[in-house]
């Protein structure tokens, strides 16, 4: 992506579901602000992020992984205005990229994760799990591009997206984009969007759980998948708690 | 304790209950039997407040309150327990978490202090042992991967933990082998046989009634109670079938 001094439009594939008006409020200079992370051979990084506020946010991270390096990002996105996180990763031989993300919120805001995963060398693996929970006319997006370059044999790349819409009017968009130029690779992607399980809600009510508590438990179970790979329990709890806090006041 | 008067209810515009009346006193175990399609499960679901079941006439009074004034979770907190014919799986939520939230939600509604983690686990262990359910099962996700019999035993463990004053048990005996049937039946006796509690036991078979001896038995047919008698009525049904018994009524 050129770091041009022009605001994106929704004609740009990577900005297809974005709130480009909000991007104009952030300002064009933000587009040039990339956080660069380079991990040497065998190095590891595990980062957790809580993003989103009442103002629009753009976060851009570019990661280069050396041989056998491992980078993990776990993110809760609770913005009440346009909030976008982009992660571009280039994987060295045998490296691993792990991404777990949750977008959650109502109102009319757009929250999105945009990843570009470049498997440039053999034997690297990547796993991305995104969950979106929205109500009102809120939107959650996951645009995930996976590029497997010629020679990146034995690549194993997986992407899994699930959206949960608590009321009509909310939306979730998943755009998996796979470009594969090697022939001995595994690339899996799945995307589903649904509603809360009514049978489970009734069962929980029959045991005395209020609609709010039942919804909270079901949402917690739903988004938990995104943070399963995060080993640090304390940080996992923080990400979940932030998401569940954002759920308060959601429609039932 | 539970008084049903002239209850009419429909599902998807189809009339299922057609003027059902029944009174169950405290201390009573009342069995409901009836042919397929008579409305037994509909009765259970109307009492539980399942969405999609519309009451078009009649009333249900539970412990002096109009049951239909209460939302499903409020009915539970008031002491009504509904044992499901098909207990629902809830992936990602453990039994322990689910039941502790349920017990404490009910306590909160009744203005009681919540149970601490330790108090809850002690209670859960005691009730699991009563129903011969491995405590490890309670750490697993709600009903996920449970066999039919395990689901029913887990239902009874839930009932033991929540300690309701009235239980509506919808075909709790289905899917149980003979040993499990005895364990579940004895569990019902131990949890619910009390002068201040009541049970409405929906079943097809005498074998559960051999363990949980009902005080009265009613036949539900075509949306109404058509006959009520003592425990011998169930035995006659078992021997002679619905058509003969109802024809001779």
Image (cartoon, grey):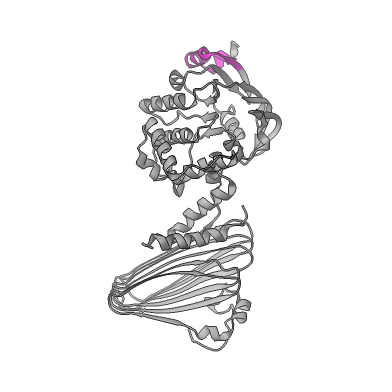
| Image position, residue B83 (x, y; %) | 51, 33
| Image position, residue A130 (x, y; %) | 47, 64
Q: Quadrant of residue A159?
A: bottom left
| Image position, residue B212 (x, y; %) | 46, 21
Q: Characterize the magenta stretch by its predominant secondary structure.
A: helix
**Does the rendering let one see residue B14?**
no
Instruction: Please tell me which residue is depicted at 41% across the width and 43% down the height of the picture.
Output: B118
Q: Is the residue B19 above or below the residue A232 in the image?
A: above
Is B239 situated left or right of B133 in this image?
right
Pick the residue in front: A123 or A178.
A123
Q: Which residues are magenta?
A: B227-245
Q: Decide whether residue A21 is among the magenta residues.
A: no
Q: Is the residue B17 above or below the residue A211 in the image?
A: above
Instruction: Please tell me which residue is depicted at 59% across the width and 75% down the height of the picture.
Output: A56
Residue at the far right in the pictured view: B57
Q: Quadrant of residue A43?
A: bottom left
Pick the residue in front: B150 or A235.
A235
Q: Is the residue B233 above or below the residue B130 in the image?
A: above
**Does the rendering let one see residue A237?**
yes
């Amino acid at each position: 992506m050129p770091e041009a001094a022009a605001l994106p439009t929704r004609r740009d594939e990577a900005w297809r579901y974005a709130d480009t008006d909000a991007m104009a409020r952030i300002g064009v200079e933000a587009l040039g602000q990339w956080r660069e992370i380079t991990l040497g051979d065998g190095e590891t990084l595990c980062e957790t992020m809580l993003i989103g506020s009442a103002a629009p946010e753009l976060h851009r991270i570019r990661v280069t992984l050396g041989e056998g390096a491992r980078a993990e990002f776990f993110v809760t996105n609770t913005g009440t205005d346009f909030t976008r996180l982009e992660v571009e990763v280039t994987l060295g031989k045998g490296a691993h990229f792990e991404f777990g993300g949750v977008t959650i919120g109502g109102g009319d805001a757009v929250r999105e994760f945009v990843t570009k995963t470049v498997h440039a060398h053999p034997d690297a693996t990547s796993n991305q799990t995104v969950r979106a929970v929205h109500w009102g006319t809120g939107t959650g997006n996951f645009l995930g591009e996976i590029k497997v370059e010629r020679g990146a044999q034995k690549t194993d790349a997986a992407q899994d997206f699930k959206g949960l819409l608590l009321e009509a009017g909310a939306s979730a968009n998943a755009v998996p984009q796979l470009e594969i130029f090697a022939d001995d690779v595994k690339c899996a992607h799945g995307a589903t969007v649904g509603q809360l399980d009514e049978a489970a809600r009734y069962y929980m009510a029959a045991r005395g759980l209020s609609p709010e508590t039942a919804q909270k438990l079901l949402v917690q179970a739903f988004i938990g998948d995104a943070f399963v790979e995060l080993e640090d329990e304390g940080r996992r709890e923080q990400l979940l708690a932030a998401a569940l806090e954002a759920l308060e006041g959601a429609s039932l | 304790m539970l008084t049903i008067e002239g209850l009419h209810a429909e599902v998807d515009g189809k009339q299922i209950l057609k003027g059902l009346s029944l009174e169950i006193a405290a201390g009573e175990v009342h069995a409901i039997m009836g042919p397929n399609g008579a409305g037994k499960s509909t009765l259970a679901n109307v009492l539980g407040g399942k969405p999609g079941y519309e009451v078009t006439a009649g009333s249900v009074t539970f412990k002096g309150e109009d049951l239909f004034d209460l939302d499903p979770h409020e009915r539970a907190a008031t002491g009504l327990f509904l044992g499901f014919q098909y207990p629902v799986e809830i992936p990602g939520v453990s039994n322990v978490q689910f039941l502790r939230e349920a017990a404490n939600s009910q306590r909160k509604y009744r203005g009681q202090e919540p149970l601490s983690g330790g108090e809850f686990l002690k209670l859960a262990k005691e009730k699991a042992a009563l129903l011969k359910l491995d405590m490890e099962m309670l750490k697993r996700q709600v009903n996920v991967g449970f066999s039919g019999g395990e689901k029913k035993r887990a239902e009874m463990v839930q009932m033991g933990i929540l300690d309701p004053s009235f239980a509506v048990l919808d075909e709790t005996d289905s899917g149980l082998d003979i040993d499990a049937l005895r364990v579940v039946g004895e569990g019902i006796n131990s949890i619910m046989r009390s002068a201040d509690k009541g049970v409405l036991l929906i079943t097809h078979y005498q074998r559960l009634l051999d363990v949980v001896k009902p005080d009265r038995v009613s036949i539900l047919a075509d949306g109404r109670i058509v006959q009520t008698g003592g425990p011998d009525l169930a035995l006659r049904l078992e021997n002679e079938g619905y058509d003969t018994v109802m024809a001779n009524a």
